[in-house]
Image (tube, coloured by chain):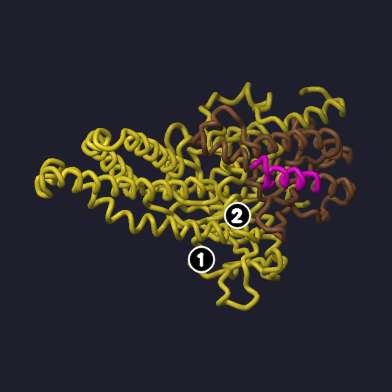
Chain colours: A brown, B yellow
Amino acid sequence: MAETHSLQDLQQPAVSSKVFIQRDYSSGTICKFQTKFPSDLESRLDKQQFEETIQTLNNLYAEAEKLGGKSYLEGCLACLTAYTIFLCMETHYEKVLKKIARYIKDQNEKIYAPRGLLLTDPVERGLRVVEITIFEDRSIGSGR
Amino acid sequence: MHLGVSESMRECEYSQISTRSSTPMETPYKKKTSKKRKWEIFPGRNKFYCGGRIMMAKQTGVFYLTLVLILVTCGLFFTFDCPFLALQLTPVIPVIGGVLFLFVLGTLLRTSFSDPGVLPRATPDEAADLERQIDVANGSTGYRPPPRTKEVVINGQTVKLKYCFTCKIFRPPRASHCSLCDNCVDRFDHHCPWVGNCVGKRNYRFFYMFILSLSFLTIFIFAFVITHIILRSHRNGFLNALKDSPASVLEVVVCFFSVWSIVGLSGFHTYLISSNQTTNEDIKGSWSSKRGKDNYNPYSHGNIFTNCCAALCGPLPPSLIDRRGFVQSDTPQLAPPTNGITMYGATQSQQSHMFSMESKPIVSDTETERLPPHPSSSSRAASQ
């Protein structure tokens, strides 16, 4: 039983807790997350790093939802082609979402995973929250 | 995966989490069960077709009526009136009619079949976290808590965000829960039985285009059918004209009764778009100056032109519910009860289900046998 237990530890880290960064609606309905540093992460992460991650995410979402010449052009073109153009082309929003997915993967690899944390892409949570999973720190004993 | 070195352990740990594929531990033991797509376990009251690509409300009878009315009226117009008009006046008439008809049909189908902007329900962890925060704020032990609201200031206006007991989320501003579809919809306008779907953020522009083009089509058909009858009457007399073209009578009747409501609706929605309000907000008078001197719409961009452009040509957000994605292990299969304490307890056991194994909770019996530390990992989670 003991061997299975340690083998278990090696292969599947236990989740200690999850932190949810809620949306910030003070600027309206645009997608923006609160930059307040959650207390649960104090032992694992720098406040500055966290704020930088969230701020970059906010900027990327703002870019996706930006109203400007380019988005209007895309909208008009889509309307004229009866929206069939999206069968062969990605919308600007989708392109930015892919960029965000790459950024989150990159942040996980470089900053979060080495600290036993995992960022979940908000799009997998309906753009409601940024979910940060805190894993048990296995460097502290066998974590029982 | 069977190495004991810490760096590769870290890699193993990371790759286990970030990828969606099943863990190596799972495949030798687990039987190949057919993977379900997310639309098959969608909790709302929606109907899905074409493998989840088409999404409609449960009651679609009126939508089929709309479709039949449009198809029959246009069919009669093209068959009985257009040949005469093309010969007597100009062949441009059927061409314009055809273009309008196709546009109407296209926008109708697009409105009816697309996701209006449904907000996916909270995962059990999120719901538990929110409950914890609310309990802390209320100081109550939480059986049957009072209705929860959160206030937020948007562009100087105080907006109340309501907690949705069904979806277990605080609804974003302008979102509303549709009782017919049992979903929270972002920028909820109204549930339209004529299109068989909710009208929300993602399909509002198609809905507007539909009613606008339908107004033009109705007026177009009405005008030209009248023209047709008048031209025939000049030749053969009024009664003979009606006898020669009985379909025209039906078309005139349908168009006459439709034109008032559809043109009226188009005008109403043009007003809503130019002031950036939803039907919901307008009916409740949320931003009406009658409520108070300082009451104004915080979402308006300031001028009519920007509001129209934003509503009609702005970026189209993608669907948040990922209908065609495959169900993963951490997708909740059951709805936890709304009672605070019970849900919290249920979440704890669900949490350990989710994170100590990468498999569906349905096959939990098999999994529990394979992973003896399951109970201890849940106690670990509880102690944190």
Amino acid marked by disc 2: Phe
Q: Quadrant of residue B16?
A: top right
Q: Split into 4 quadrants, where in the image is the N terminus of chain B?
A: top right
Looking at the rendered structure, whether the residues under marks 1 and 2 are on a common chain is answered as yes
Q: Is residue B38 toward the left or the right of residue B47 in the image?
A: right
Q: Is residue B298 above or below residue B113?
A: below
Write the start and end of the magenta stretch as one range.
A55-71
Task: Return the residue nearer the eye: A26 or B104.
Answer: B104
- Chain under callout 1: B
- Residue B294: image location, x then y, percent: 65, 75
The kind of secondary structure element at disc 2 is helix
> Mark 2 belongs to which subunit?
B
- A62 lies left or right of B290: right
Residue at (63, 78) in percent of width and height: B293
The location of residue B341, given as percent across then percent down, is: 62, 60
Viewer-nearest residue: A55 or A92: A92
**Residue at the disc numbered 1:** B282
How much space separates mark 1 and mark 2, taking CA atoms?
20 Å
Secondary structure mostly taken by the magenta-highlighted segment of the chain: helix
Q: Nearer the viewer, residue A14 or B60?
A: B60
